[in-house]
Amino acid sequence: MDRYIVDPTWYSSNYKALSLLAFQRSEIPSTPSRKEEEKEAMTIKPAVRISESKLVVKDRTILTGVPDNVMATSGSSSGPVDGVFLGVVFDQENSRHVVSLGALRDVRFMACFRFKLWWMAQKMGDQGRDIPLETQFLLVETKDGSHLESDGGDEENQIVYTVFLPLIEGSFRACLQGNADDELELCLESGDAETKRTSFSHSVFIHAGRDPFRTITEAVRAVKLHLKTFRQRHEKKLPGIVDYFGWCTWDAFYQEVTQEGVEAGLESLASGGTPPKFVIIDDGWQSVGGDPQEKINDQDEKKQNQQPLLRLTGIKENAKFQKKDDPTAGIKSIVNVAKEKHGLKYVYVWHAITGYWGGVRPEVKEMEEYGSTLKYPMVSKGVVENEPTWKNDVMALQGLGLVNPKNVYKFYNELHSYLASAGIDGVKVDVQCILETLGGSLGGRVQLTRQYHQALDASVARNFPDNGCIACMSHNTDALCW
């Protein structure tokens, strides 16, 4: 199946390779011999290199004071791109590491960082301390130089753009952050106390060029060739809904959506001269319920004062989407109305990647085969710093019913095959970043995310062949690059 997650900035289709330059980390003697000087004069320097504890990009210094335990590896095996992978060696194994990559000053940058668990935003700055926690993309621009492509043929005087892409390496996920000393730091974490490591070789990819758009595209292509886990936009099958105007029920009804409400919305849009060709029936159609009262009574006072977190209790729709005269018709009834009466081409429905916000409720007879167990999210330090309210979030306090990763394909396939049999064409899969918080004792965040997404991809490919899947609340690199 084609990967369904699309990032409009990263996955541009205009690619033109730069010439490949060999990479090596070198220390140049202060008093070289004549032979060494002649040899150096005949050598083309790599576009990106570490030399004398500096990260040098097209002869411009980007980072200073690069520590000795930060290592660089040529990106030549990942395509014809002037880039390097950075890695780090630590003295002790751990499930979380933070290390300086050097000081970042006298440049301008744009960072894409997670201001919430689910979402990314951008921030501009000109020194290392301005780089937010949970930065997943960093574009650095040299302050000196010209924006003109030719600039009289003087390439030495042109603006240089350097892109930093923190990656997935093994069971660890990388991100960037700044500190008070203007240092750019690399944070590596597995999300599982038992999943530890001491050395990394391909945790960040760095590429540089004079066209920021082409530089980003080439960097993403190099990472794609290295990881072999995702495709770029031009390589993907786009679902048919992208060519049509449609309507999502969320803003109109939130969780109070009903079959009658969906039909009323379609009629309203048509009467206003904007008939939709697809509809997404958002949260509110599923069979859900809270925990049994005896479990609620056992919880502490803070949890008891919260609204119960609802969990999935069945595969099929709830009573709001069952016709009184023919309950067996189920959600197929509104699908038929949408397509036959209102001329819609596509009907999608919503579900969380864990089934529902509170997951799948354990010990429910209809759902026992999926092996759901209650797990409590362990949110990373960077996310909690950016989003302090997570400490009292209902999911953090009441936990989620997580389907056993060994059974998650069975869960998705049975859910999706039921929907497909009712004429549903695709799904909007929400709450995706929650997986990174549930990897404890399961091999870590990357491993759990990979297992769930592989199962989801396989089920969507089998049941919705138009690649009918929308990813939502999914702005972590675990999901983008697993």
Image: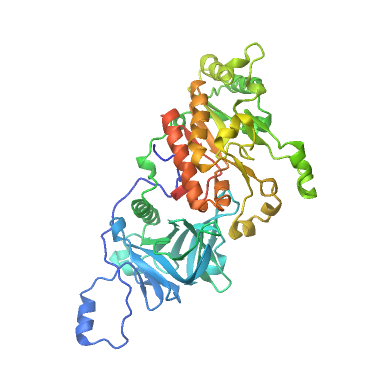
Residue that appears at 66% across and 22% down = 319
Q: Quadrant of the N terminus?
A: top left
Residue 425, placed above or below residue 440: above
Residue 388, placed above or below residue 4: below
Question: Could you say where residue 55 lies in the image, as x and y percent from the top left?
Answer: 40, 71
**Residue sitting farthest toward the top:** 325
**Rendering quarter of residue 57:** bottom left
Question: Could you say where residue 60 lies in the image, as x and y percent from the top left?
Answer: 38, 71
Q: Can you see residue 466?
A: no
Left or right placement of residue 169 versus residue 120 in this view = left
Question: Could you say where residue 392 lies in the image, as x and y percent from the top left?
Answer: 71, 51
Question: Could you say where residue 214 lies in the image, as x and y percent from the top left?
Answer: 36, 53
**Rendering quarter of residue 21:** bottom left
Residue 199, placed above or below residue 33: above
Left or right placement of residue 446 versus residue 56 in this view = right
Residue that appears at 52% across and 48% down = 475
Q: Nearer the viewer, residue 279 or 357?
A: 357
- Colour setup of the view: rainbow
